[in-house]
Amino acid sequence: MKRKKLTASMIALVMSVSLPMTTYAANWYLEDGSVTVNADNSGQTVTQGSGSAVPDEAPVITQRESSVETGNTITINAAENATANVTISDVNINTSGKSGKSEAAVSTNGKGNVNIELDGTNTLKSGRNHAGLEKNSDGNQGKLTITDENENGKLIATGGSDAAGIGGGYCGDGNDITIAGGKVTATGGNYGAGIGGGGHGNGKNITITDGEVTAIGGLNGAGIGGGLRNNGEKITVSGDATLKVQGGPTDAWDGAGAGIGNGGYITEELTPVNGAETEPDTSNLTTGKIEYYAPGADMTKDKPTSTTLGSRQPEPASPGETAAPVEYRMQSSASEPVQGNGKSTGYKAPVQGHFYQVVGQDGKTMIFATAQKKDVLAIATDSDFAMLTGKMEDIEALRKQGVRRIIFATKRATSTFLLSELLEKRAYGEIWSLIHDGENVAFTAVEKKMDISSILTRLQTK
């Protein structure tokens, strides 16, 4: 009983942390100049203006006065096999009126991955040929992930003419984009998609797993997918994502853009044709939904033309009542209620199936507790040494059940990782292990003995 009480207390502490934080974060104010973040296998640095590079693993880029627009920009460079981690907090960037060479408000580059965390309200507006948040497949070949871990973030991204709101610039393809939280509104400039390709650019491998997302195509552009005369494919909407999409209107030459799919085009006979709709993958859409609006409709007043609902919509509350809150669940490894303060919690298992093991130095299974809050799964044991281990195929199954992040806590160490980033290490083998030995932490792909600790982040309590 004493062990269960302690483990339950550890779980409560783990679930109260603020995600994600590292001990090296610093604030960078755009009033002091444009900011460039460089990430490679040796770490991450930040350079501002003409200053020298400063190591910073989790920079927070912000403004002292966000009501005032700035023309200073954010550039994020991630080298191959590296991941850049950046938080933007209450920035208000507008490069559309800058004289000389047009620029993107925020641009990502390199063969590595870029993670952008949203805090506060962030407004990005770019000039001609550039997306509000620009990711061209030839410029950034890795994955762009937009998150809102603290559930306080908002992004309004508007592309210039011939560019997407989020994705490609002129003739740029907006591949491998994931939105995993936040209130995001992406509006394409003329001929660009809301999220996806710029004018004459394709948009594919776009995934929305969470958050409230509105994607509006510019003239002839898709809401999500291709820009003018180009295509959109491999669009996935899952979890509790709430999505509103609207294709851009037709003009005298080309047809209207699809809500999700292709941009409008013109035939050889000079006949405008609307872009074809592409059916998104909604197999894992649960409590979320997709609303389609006609080109030119007022999305604040008009009703959607069609709606796709997830498989587990909440039951409507009775008159005078509110819907039940999301359950906070806890269990022990033996699937029995965890005891706290001498009373049974009665909570049920947070996930179904056996997707991992916790073992000790002797290789035997240990007593542990778990808790799930939204898409975060916490696993804790009251030992100095413990190894959390499993197979990649089970991590994939766990993710399909709605888990996006795992926290592992022992007596003197706590670490966390995104399931998506662990799955990216699959090339190193099927078996993974996360070892806590006192304050020391090691994350390994077992078959090839590869250190994958770079995907771990530290936690900081509120």
Image: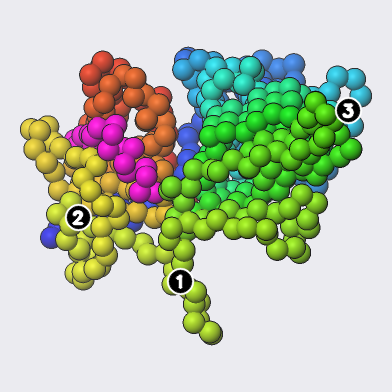
- State which quarter of the image contains the N terminus: bottom left
Q: Is residue 364 left or right of residue 380?
A: left
Instruction: Name the residue tied to disc 3.
Output: 98
Q: Secondary structure at mark 3?
A: loop
Asked whether residue 155 is in view, the answer is no
Q: Is residue 403 visible?
A: yes
Q: Secondary structure at mark 1?
A: loop
Q: Position of residue 115 (x, y in %)?
A: 54, 32
Mark 2 belongs to which amino acid? Ser
Residue extending farthest right = 99
Residue 279: image quadrant is top right
Which residue is painted at 46% across and 51% down in the image? 285
Q: Callout 3: 10 Å neighbours few (<14), some, many (20+)? A: few
Q: CA distance from mark 3 to mark 2?
A: 59 Å
Q: Which residues are magenta?
A: 385-402
Residue in the image at 82% along x and 35% along y: 271
Q: Residue 113: say if magenta.
A: no
User: Where residue 122 appears, x then y in whole percent?
Assistant: 70, 43
Identify the amino acid type marked 1: Glu
Q: Which mark is residue 332?
A: 2
Within-10-Å neighbours for mark 1: few <14, some 14–19, many 20+ = few
Earlier sequence position, callout 3 versus callout 2: 3
Q: Residue at x 59, y 58 (%)?
A: 307
